[in-house]
Image (spheres, grey):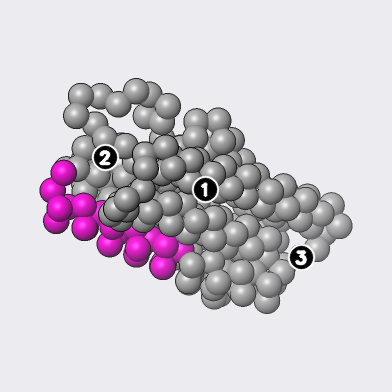
């Protein structure tokens, strides 16, 4: 494994965690101010993604003196925590989305939320390409799978932008909790796949045995 490419993978993971933390804080603040469950759900997803990225950092950092069994046990424990967190937050967003639809709790239009979604749509596709190409050069299934998760976040950003845009431009407030339900589906799928397969990814290659030369 090329040391320069491995270092690049580590830096990309650091950037992913840092960006997701900032995105989570901004989204949660914007969601709180506007009463938008779509933004809150998006922020919570970004928060959990930062945990996932933290596990990727742990994978690519050198860990001298750590036995293989101890390493695997720590990683499995971290993955289990991330998977359960996805499901718990998904249940919360589901409750809030349905409550807002039923009681017609109308969220305020959020220009800040729209800006957050646009920035994410700019950053995430580029980050996906960098992570995928680096993972391919390293023959790393983990990083390539993580890149697919980044791409899924880009699609989620697009859904968020549509929901917030419909509310901001046309006053269709129902779009906000409906997008919240889309976030629920994403969180649920992430959580289930993570717990079921013990991997931090949702791409089609997860759970398959590594091909020739492929690394975790």
Residue closer to the observer: 100 or 27: 27
Q: Residue at x 24, y 31 (%)?
A: 214
Q: Is residue 116 magenta?
A: no
Q: Which SS type dominates the magenta stretch?
A: helix
- Binning the other alpha carbons within 10 Å of mark 1 as few (below 14), some (14 to 19) or many (20 upward) gives some
Residue 179 point in image, percent of width and height: 62, 52
Percent coordinates x, y for residue 26 in the rendering: 54, 73
- Give the magenta-colored segment's residue range: 1-20
Q: Earlier in the sequence, mark 3 or mark 2?
A: 3
Q: Distance of mark 2 from mark 1, alpha carbons?
A: 19 Å
Q: Which residue is more in the foreground, 85 or 26?
A: 85
Give 166 or 35, whichever is nearer the viewer: 35
Instruction: State which tag comes first along the sequence, 1 or 3.
Output: 1
Whole-number angstrom distance, CA of label 1 to CA of label 3: 37 Å
Question: Quadrant of the image for the C terminus?
Answer: top left
Farthest residue to the right: give it. 103
Q: Give the structural element (helix, strand or loop) at label 2.
A: loop
Q: Is residue 104 left or right of residue 11?
A: right
Q: Residue at x 82, y 54 (%)?
A: 99
The numbered disc on residue 106 is 3
Is disc 1 placed on a helix, strand or loop? Answer: helix
In this figure, which residue is indicated by the disc labeled 2? 140
Residue 193 location, x and y as percent?
Answer: 53, 34
Between marks 3 and 2 in the image, the one whose residue lies nearer the viewer: 2
The residue identified by callout 1 is 78
**Residue 5 lies in the magenta-colored region:** yes
């Amino acid at each position: 494994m090329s040391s320069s490419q491995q270092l690049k993978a580590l830096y990309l993971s650091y950037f992913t965690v840092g960006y997701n933390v900032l995105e989570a804080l901004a989204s949660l603040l914007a969601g709180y101010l506007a009463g938008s469950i779509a933004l809150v759900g998006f922020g919570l997803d970004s928060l959990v993604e930062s945990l996932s990225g933290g596990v990727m950092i742990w994978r690519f950092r050198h860990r001298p003196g750590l036995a293989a069994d101890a390493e695997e046990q720590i990683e499995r424990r971290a993955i289990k925590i991330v998977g359960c967190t996805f499901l718990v937050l998904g249940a919360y967003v589901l409750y809030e989305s349905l409550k807002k639809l039923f009681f017609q709790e109308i969220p305020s239009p959020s220009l800040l939320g729209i800006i957050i979604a646009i920035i994410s749509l700019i950053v995430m596709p580029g980050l996906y390409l960098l992570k995928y190409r680096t993972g391919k050069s390293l023959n790393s299934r983990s990083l390539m799978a993580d890149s697919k998760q980044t791409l899924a976040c880009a699609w989620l950003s697009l859904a968020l932008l549509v929901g917030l845009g419909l509310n901001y431009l046309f006053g269709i407030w129902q779009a906000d909790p409906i997008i919240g339900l889309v976030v629920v589906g994403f969180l649920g799928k992430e959580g289930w796949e993570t717990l079921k397969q013990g991997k931090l990814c949702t791409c089609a290659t997860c759970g398959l045995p590594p091909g020739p030369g492929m690394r975790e």
